[in-house]
C-alpha cells in the first residue's frame, strides 16, 4: 500500500517533534543535576558545622544568670555535678581557688581562666568543652569572655529572685506560665514580669519596688490583696526581701 505524500510529511514531522522533546528533556535533566552538585559543593545543603548558635541574636545582655549558669545546668552538670545545682554554689565552685590550682574563673582575666580556655577549639590541656554536644558558638564564647573580663559579676540581686522562682515549693510550682520553657528561661520570665498585671498592679515595675506586685506579695504588711507569697515556702528572709526590692529599684536587670 502506498503512503500519500501529505501523510508521509505529517509522520516525519511528528517523529522530529518527539526526538526534539527527548533531547530537550535530557538537557534539562543534566542542568538540574549540575545545579544539585553545585549546591552540595558550595555547602548550601551539606553544612557539617556543629556549633550551638541558638539565642545569639538576643538583645538581652548576657552574664552569669542568663548565660553561664544555664550553660552549667544544661551542658556541664552531667560530669561536673559537684559544681552544684544552685546558682550560688556553682558560682563559688568556679571562682574559688583549689589548693595550688588557680580558680577556673579568674575575675577580670578571661585569657588566664581555664573555664573560658576550655570552651575554645584549642585549650591548653585536654579537649574542648562541653564534651559530646555541639560546641558553643563564637558569639557565646565571646560573651563569656566579656563577662569574665568585666569582673565575672554574679548578679546576686537577680539570683535571689531566681532562686525563689525556681526553688522547690516556690513560684515555679504554681506560676509555670511565667517561664514558659522552664525556670532558667530568663527572657520569657522577664517579658512576663514586665508586662503582666493583676488587680491593677504590674508584676515588676523597673525602678519602683513599692509599685511592683511581685515585691508587695512577698511582704505581708504591704500585701494589697490575697495571700502573701510564696505559699507553703518560708525562706524569704528580711535580707532577701531587701535584695529583691533593691534589684527592682535598680531597674530589674536580668544580666
Image: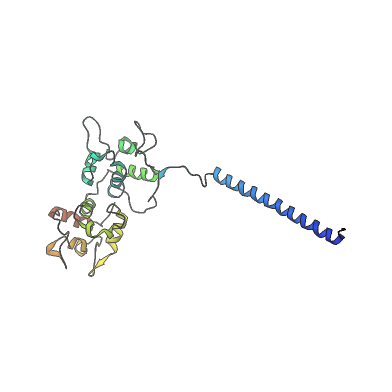
Q: Residue at x 19, y 60 (%)?
A: 215
Relative image position of residue 185 (x, y in whole percent)? 30, 53
Residue 113 appears in the figure: no
Query: Does 205 sit left or right of 37 as displayed?
Result: left
205, 93: nearer the viewer: 93
Q: Residue furthest top?
A: 100
Query: Does 106 sit left or right of 27 as displayed?
Result: left
Q: Residue at x 39, y 34 (%)?
A: 122
The answer to which quarter of the image holds residue 18 is bottom right
249, 76: nearer the viewer: 76
* Relative to 114, residue 199 above or below: below
How many marks on residues? 0
Relative image position of residue 179 (x, y in whole percent)? 29, 57
Q: Residue at x 21, y 65 (%)?
A: 211
* Relative to 136, residue 227 above or below: below
The answer to which quarter of the image holds residue 202 is bottom left
227, 104: nearer the viewer: 227
Relative image position of residue 166 (x, y in whole percent)? 23, 53
Relative image position of residue 228 (x, y in whole percent)? 15, 62
145, 47: nearer the viewer: 47
Residue 10 appears in the figure: yes
Q: Which quarter of the rendering shows the N terminus?
A: bottom right
Amino acid at each position: 500500500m502506498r503512503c500519500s505524500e501529505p501523510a508521509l510529511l505529517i509522520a516525519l514531522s511528528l517523529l522530529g517533534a518527539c526526538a526534539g522533546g527527548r533531547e530537550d528533556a535530557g538537557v534539562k535533566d543534566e542542568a538540574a543535576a549540575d545545579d544539585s552538585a553545585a549546591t552540595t559543593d558550595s555547602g548550601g545543603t551539606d553544612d557539617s558545622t556543629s556549633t550551638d548558635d541558638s539565642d545569639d541574636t538576643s538583645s538581652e545582655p548576657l552574664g552569669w544568670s542568663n548565660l553561664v549558669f544555664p550553660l552549667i545546668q544544661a551542658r556541664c552538670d552531667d560530669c561536673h555535678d559537684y559544681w552544684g545545682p544552685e546558682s550560688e554554689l556553682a558560682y563559688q565552685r568556679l571562682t574559688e581557688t583549689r589548693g595550688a590550682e588557680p580558680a577556673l574563673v579568674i575575675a577580670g582575666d578571661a585569657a588566664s581562666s581555664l573555664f573560658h580556655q576550655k570552651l575554645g577549639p584549642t585549650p591548653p590541656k585536654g579537649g574542648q568543652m562541653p564534651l559530646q554536644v555541639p560546641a558553643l558558638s563564637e558569639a557565646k564564647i565571646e560573651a563569656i569572655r566579656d563577662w569574665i573580663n568585666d569582673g565575672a559579676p554574679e548578679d546576686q540581686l537577680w539570683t535571689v529572685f531566681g532562686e525563689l522562682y525556681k526553688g522547690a515549693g516556690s513560684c515555679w510550682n504554681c506560676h509555670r506560665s511565667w517561664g514558659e520553657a522552664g525556670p532558667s528561661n530568663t527572657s520569657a520570665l522577664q517579658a512576663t514580669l514586665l508586662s503582666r498585671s493583676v488587680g491593677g498592679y504590674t508584676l515588676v515595675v523597673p525602678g519602683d519596688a513599692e509599685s511592683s506586685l511581685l515585691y508587695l506579695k512577698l511582704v505581708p504588711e504591704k500585701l494589697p490583696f490575697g495571700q502573701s507569697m510564696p505559699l507553703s515556702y518560708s525562706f524569704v528572709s528580711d535580707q532577701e526581701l531587701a535584695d529583691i526590692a533593691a534589684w527592682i529599684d535598680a531597674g530589674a536587670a536580668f544580666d
